[in-house]
Image: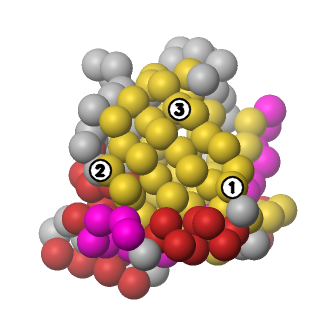
Amino acid sequence: MIEIERKFLVLSKDFITESFSKKRIVQAYLNSNPERTVRVRIKENKGFLTIKGKGNSTGATRLEWEKEIPIEEAEKLLLICEYGIIDKIRHEIKVGQHVFEVDIFTLENDGLLLAEIELESEDEAFEKPIWLGKEVTNDERYYNAYLSKNPFKNW
Protein backbone atom coordinates (compact mmCIF):
# COMPACT_ATOMS: atom_id res chain seq x y z
CA MET A 1 0.00 0.00 0.00
CA ILE A 2 3.02 2.29 -0.23
CA GLU A 3 3.57 4.12 -3.50
CA ILE A 4 6.99 5.49 -4.42
CA GLU A 5 6.64 7.72 -7.44
CA ARG A 6 8.62 10.54 -8.99
CA LYS A 7 7.06 13.12 -11.31
CA PHE A 8 8.61 15.17 -14.12
CA LEU A 9 7.64 17.77 -16.68
CA VAL A 10 7.84 16.54 -20.27
CA LEU A 11 9.71 18.66 -22.82
CA SER A 12 8.10 17.40 -26.03
CA LYS A 13 5.71 14.82 -27.45
CA ASP A 14 8.61 12.79 -28.88
CA PHE A 15 7.67 9.97 -26.47
CA ILE A 16 4.49 9.19 -28.45
CA THR A 17 6.32 7.05 -31.01
CA GLU A 18 7.70 4.92 -28.13
CA SER A 19 4.30 4.45 -26.44
CA PHE A 20 3.02 0.88 -26.13
CA SER A 21 -0.27 1.84 -24.46
CA LYS A 22 -2.67 4.78 -24.72
CA LYS A 23 -5.72 5.20 -22.49
CA ARG A 24 -8.12 8.01 -21.68
CA ILE A 25 -8.55 8.79 -17.98
CA VAL A 26 -11.32 10.90 -16.44
CA GLN A 27 -11.16 11.51 -12.72
CA ALA A 28 -12.44 13.74 -9.94
CA TYR A 29 -12.19 13.93 -6.17
CA LEU A 30 -14.64 13.10 -3.43
CA ASN A 31 -12.06 14.68 -1.11
CA SER A 32 -9.09 16.75 -2.31
CA ASN A 33 -7.62 17.43 1.15
CA PRO A 34 -3.84 16.80 0.80
CA GLU A 35 -3.89 14.77 4.03
CA ARG A 36 -6.13 12.16 2.37
CA THR A 37 -7.37 12.45 -1.18
CA VAL A 38 -10.22 10.24 -2.34
CA ARG A 39 -10.32 9.89 -6.10
CA VAL A 40 -12.85 8.38 -8.50
CA ARG A 41 -11.36 7.40 -11.85
CA ILE A 42 -12.59 5.94 -15.10
CA LYS A 43 -9.77 4.48 -17.16
CA GLU A 44 -11.15 3.41 -20.53
CA ASN A 45 -13.99 1.03 -19.49
CA LYS A 46 -12.98 0.39 -15.85
CA GLY A 47 -13.79 2.27 -12.65
CA PHE A 48 -11.47 2.80 -9.67
CA LEU A 49 -11.69 4.27 -6.20
CA THR A 50 -8.36 5.44 -4.77
CA ILE A 51 -7.33 6.84 -1.42
CA LYS A 52 -3.94 8.51 -1.10
CA GLY A 53 -2.27 9.77 2.05
CA LYS A 54 -0.04 12.80 2.40
CA GLY A 55 3.39 12.45 0.87
CA ASN A 56 6.59 12.36 2.90
CA SER A 57 9.08 15.27 2.94
CA THR A 58 10.28 14.51 -0.62
CA GLY A 59 6.74 14.01 -1.94
CA ALA A 60 7.75 10.69 -3.51
CA THR A 61 6.41 8.22 -0.94
CA ARG A 62 2.87 7.93 0.39
CA LEU A 63 0.14 5.48 1.21
CA GLU A 64 -2.05 4.50 -1.73
CA TRP A 65 -5.07 2.18 -1.65
CA GLU A 66 -6.92 1.46 -4.88
CA LYS A 67 -9.78 -0.86 -5.76
CA GLU A 68 -11.50 -1.51 -9.05
CA ILE A 69 -15.22 -0.77 -8.91
CA PRO A 70 -17.96 -1.28 -11.52
CA ILE A 71 -17.87 1.47 -14.13
CA GLU A 72 -21.55 2.27 -13.45
CA GLU A 73 -20.67 3.02 -9.80
CA ALA A 74 -17.69 5.17 -10.84
CA GLU A 75 -19.94 7.16 -13.21
CA LYS A 76 -22.45 7.80 -10.38
CA LEU A 77 -19.70 8.77 -7.93
CA LEU A 78 -18.27 11.27 -10.43
CA LEU A 79 -21.60 13.12 -10.23
CA ILE A 80 -21.10 13.89 -6.53
CA CYS A 81 -17.40 14.75 -6.68
CA GLU A 82 -15.95 18.15 -5.88
CA TYR A 83 -15.83 20.66 -8.74
CA GLY A 84 -13.00 20.08 -11.20
CA ILE A 85 -12.61 17.18 -13.62
CA ILE A 86 -9.23 15.91 -14.76
CA ASP A 87 -9.27 14.54 -18.30
CA LYS A 88 -6.07 13.19 -19.82
CA ILE A 89 -4.58 10.68 -22.21
CA ARG A 90 -2.03 8.40 -20.56
CA HIS A 91 0.78 6.87 -22.59
CA GLU A 92 3.02 4.14 -21.22
CA ILE A 93 6.61 4.07 -22.41
CA LYS A 94 9.24 1.49 -21.49
CA VAL A 95 12.62 3.09 -20.84
CA GLY A 96 15.32 0.70 -19.70
CA GLN A 97 13.91 -1.46 -16.91
CA HIS A 98 11.09 0.96 -16.03
CA VAL A 99 7.79 2.18 -17.45
CA PHE A 100 7.00 5.89 -17.55
CA GLU A 101 3.38 6.98 -17.54
CA VAL A 102 3.10 10.21 -19.52
CA ASP A 103 -0.12 12.20 -19.24
CA ILE A 104 -1.27 14.64 -21.91
CA PHE A 105 -3.85 16.79 -20.14
CA THR A 106 -6.90 18.24 -21.87
CA LEU A 107 -9.74 20.63 -21.00
CA GLU A 108 -8.70 23.10 -18.27
CA ASN A 109 -5.20 21.63 -18.05
CA ASP A 110 -4.54 21.57 -21.79
CA GLY A 111 -0.86 22.02 -22.60
CA LEU A 112 0.43 20.23 -19.52
CA LEU A 113 2.56 17.13 -20.05
CA LEU A 114 3.65 15.13 -16.98
CA ALA A 115 5.60 11.90 -16.62
CA GLU A 116 5.54 9.61 -13.59
CA ILE A 117 7.70 6.63 -12.76
CA GLU A 118 7.04 4.16 -9.94
CA LEU A 119 10.10 2.90 -8.11
CA GLU A 120 11.03 0.34 -5.46
CA SER A 121 12.93 3.00 -3.45
CA GLU A 122 13.26 6.77 -3.67
CA ASP A 123 16.92 6.57 -4.66
CA GLU A 124 16.52 3.78 -7.23
CA ALA A 125 18.47 4.55 -10.40
CA PHE A 126 16.57 4.80 -13.69
CA GLU A 127 17.29 5.82 -17.25
CA LYS A 128 16.13 9.34 -18.14
CA PRO A 129 14.83 9.74 -21.70
CA ILE A 130 15.67 12.91 -23.66
CA TRP A 131 12.07 14.16 -23.47
CA LEU A 132 12.12 14.13 -19.64
CA GLY A 133 12.31 17.61 -18.10
CA LYS A 134 12.51 19.14 -14.64
CA GLU A 135 11.52 17.00 -11.64
CA VAL A 136 8.35 18.28 -9.91
CA THR A 137 7.77 15.43 -7.45
CA ASN A 138 7.50 17.72 -4.43
CA ASP A 139 5.64 20.55 -6.18
CA GLU A 140 1.98 20.24 -5.16
CA ARG A 141 0.89 22.38 -8.14
CA TYR A 142 1.41 19.29 -10.30
CA TYR A 143 -0.72 16.96 -8.16
CA ASN A 144 -3.96 16.05 -9.91
CA ALA A 145 -6.02 17.06 -6.88
CA TYR A 146 -4.48 20.55 -7.05
CA LEU A 147 -4.94 20.74 -10.83
CA SER A 148 -8.63 19.92 -10.44
CA LYS A 149 -9.08 23.13 -8.41
CA ASN A 150 -6.33 25.30 -9.93
CA PRO A 151 -6.14 24.43 -13.62
CA PHE A 152 -2.89 24.82 -15.53
CA LYS A 153 -4.51 27.32 -17.94
CA ASN A 154 -4.88 29.81 -15.03
CA TRP A 155 -1.23 29.79 -13.97
Q: Report the amino acid beneath label 2.
A: Ser
Q: CA distance from mark 1 to mark 2?
A: 20 Å
Residue at 59% x, 15% y is 121
Residue 59 position by quadrant: top left
Residue 24 position by quadrant: bottom right
The residue pinned by badge 3 equals 64
Q: Report the amino acid beneath label 3.
A: Glu
Callouts 2 and 3 close, C-beta under 8 Å: no
Near mark 3 (Cα within 10 A), the count class, few <14, some 14-19 or many ≥20, is some
* Residue 32, disc: 2
The mark nearer the N terminus, 1 or 3, is 3
Quarter of the image for the N terminus: give it: top right
The mark nearer the N terminus, 2 or 3, is 2
Q: CA distance from mark 2 to mark 3?
A: 14 Å
Residue at 29% x, 50% y is 32
Q: Which residues are magenta?
A: 80-97
Return the x and y of residue 91 as percentages of the image width and height. Answer: 68, 64
Return the x and y of residue 64 as percentages of the image width and height. Answer: 53, 32
Tell me if residue 100 can be seen: yes
Of residues 59 and 38, the one drawn nearer to the viewer in this rendering: 38
Picture mark count: 3
Within the magenta stretch, is there residue 56? no
Side (left or right) of 7 relative to 124: left
Near mark 1 (Cα within 10 A), the count class, few <14, some 14-19 or many ≥20, is some
The residue pinned by badge 1 equals 69
Callouts 1 and 3 close, C-beta under 8 Å: no
Of residues 102 and 88, the one drawn nearer to the viewer in this rendering: 88
